[in-house]
Image (cartoon, grey):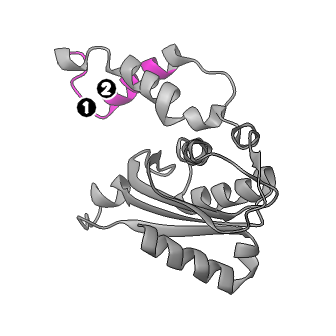
Amino acid sequence: MSSIDKAAAAQHLEAFLRAVGAPIDRDPEMRGTGARVADAWVDELLAGYRADPAVILAEGTESSSKGLVILADIPATTMCPHHLLPASGVVHVGYWPGPRVVGFGAIARLVECFTRRLALQEDIARSIAEALVEHLGADGAGVVVDLAPSCLLARGERPHGAHAITTGFAGRCATEASARQELLLALGRAS
């Protein structure tokens, strides 16, 4: 992210609330809302822009293991770039190691790196898988993102209980159907 101006963001948020008819100047509960929202977006919801997947995956350990590594049910929340509404759920990550592996905490931080950005769910899955191949040297990677998008649940048809599942693959998982099948079968058991 380029320059961050929380004060300007807070002012624009308050102007937005006034423009949509919110009683920001009359309701004492709304006093400071612009600043609180700006803080939440900069410090948390868009923190992924300040994270570098190459740095997250840099501290790996040499390993001769070639077996599938899976971390399932990683809690995640992202913001829809179309409506600026949250989508929450879980992300499942699997990869076949190349010369190195990383700790499970690094995988969770990688998920946060890409979910704490304005991104489509489909792009999140692909970006995580590609980062594992590019920056860790994984032979293949696959990611399943399972989120309940508020833009679907809070507006329009409102199909309560609906969730969206997307996948992303890289390396041999993108080119070999048997690798994708192995990964998805293992994730089904792990979840």
Crowding near pointer 2: few (<14 within 10 Å), some, many (20+)? few
Report the side of 112 relative to 162 (left or right).
right
Report the side of 32 relative to 29 (left or right).
right
> Viewer-proximal residue, 181 or 47?
181
Residue at mark 1: 21
Magenta range: 9-25
Image quarter of the N terminus: top right
Image quarter of the C terminus: bottom left
Horizontal and vertical percent position of residue 113: 60, 42
> Viewer-proximal residue, 151 or 69?
69
Any part of residue 12 in sight: no
Q: Quadrant of residue 98?
A: bottom right
* Residue 36 to residue 72: above or below: above
| Three-letter code, disc 2 | Arg
Any part of residue 44 in sight: yes
> Viewer-proximal residue, 19 or 73?
73
Horizontal and vertical percent position of residue 138: 76, 60
Q: Residue visible at 39% across and 46% down?
A: 85
Residue at mark 2: 18
Query: Which element is circle 2 on?
Result: helix
Q: Is residue 157 magenta?
A: no
Query: Which element is circle 1 on?
Result: loop
| Three-letter code, disc 1 | Gly
Q: Residue visible at 27% across and 54% down?
A: 154
Q: Is residue 17 magenta?
A: yes
Please tell me whether the stretch drawn in magenta is mainly helix, strand or loop: helix
Are circles 1 and 2 on residues that touch, CB within 8 Å? Answer: yes
* Residue 110 to residue 172: above or below: above
Report the side of 17 relative to 93 (left or right).
left
Crowding near pointer 1: few (<14 within 10 Å), some, many (20+)? few
Horizontal and vertical percent position of residue 69: 61, 62
